[in-house]
Amino acid sequence: MNWASLSHNMMRIAFGLLFVPHGLQKVFGILGKPQASDPLHWVAGFIELIGGLMIVLGFKTRWAAFLCSGMMFVAYWMAHGTRAPMPIVNGGEPALLYCFAFFFLFGNGGGSFSLDAKLKK
């Protein structure tokens, strides 16, 4: 395994693991946040939870990453983009980082250490 492959897999796993707790908060009301009370946040929570787990495992990575990237793009514009033009000012940097990290995974797949790679063999 080379450095590019190792860093690709580490990025996939790290971003997936960081994404899952957002879903846990919305769906189950744990980790310091109340349970989502409206349908839009419920859908977002399930995408974060299920999509994040799929990304961690590298299972159907491209599809999960595409869905998660799109959701974070929409979340940025709904929650942050209307407040101010710059992400540093409107607090939207994490949403954009997730958006572009997942878009990278959509374009590049799950990597060599993923269920996708194991199932392909």
Image (cartoon, rainbow, N blue to C red):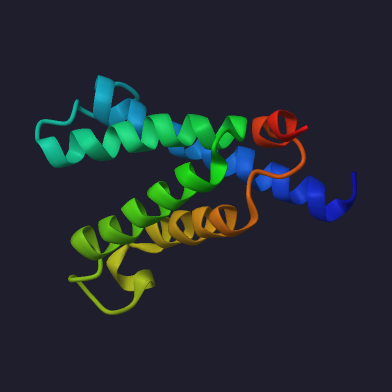
Q: Position of residue 24 (x, y in %)?
A: 35, 26
Q: Can residue 7 be seen in this snapshot?
A: yes
Instruction: Say which of 95 and 102 sits in front.
Output: 102
User: Residue drawn 48% across and 59% down?
Assistant: 97
Instruction: Name, please, the residue furthest toward the front.
Output: 121
Q: Position of residue 36 (x, y in %)?
A: 17, 31
Residue 103 left/right relative to 86:
right
Q: Position of residue 90 (x, y in %)?
A: 28, 68
Relative to 13, residue 7 above or below: below
Picture quarter with the N terminus: top right
Relative to 67, residue 59 above or below: above
Instruction: Say which of 27 and 29 sits in front.
Output: 27
User: Residue drawn 75% across and 35% down?
Assistant: 113
Instruction: Say which of 21 and 112 sits in front.
Output: 112
- Residue 85 lies in quadrant: bottom left
Instruction: Name, please, the residue furthest toward the left.
Output: 38
User: Residue drawn 90% across and 50% down?
Assistant: 2
User: So how many labels did they put on this image?
Assistant: 0
Residue 58 left/right relative to 102:
right
User: Residue drawn 86% across and 52% down?
Assistant: 3
Picture quarter with the C terminus: top right
- Residue 73 lies in quadrant: bottom left
Q: Can residue 32 be seen in this snapshot?
A: no
Instruction: Name, please, the residue furthest toward the bottom.
Output: 85
Residue 115 left/right relative to 38:
right
Residue 84 left/right relative to 4:
left
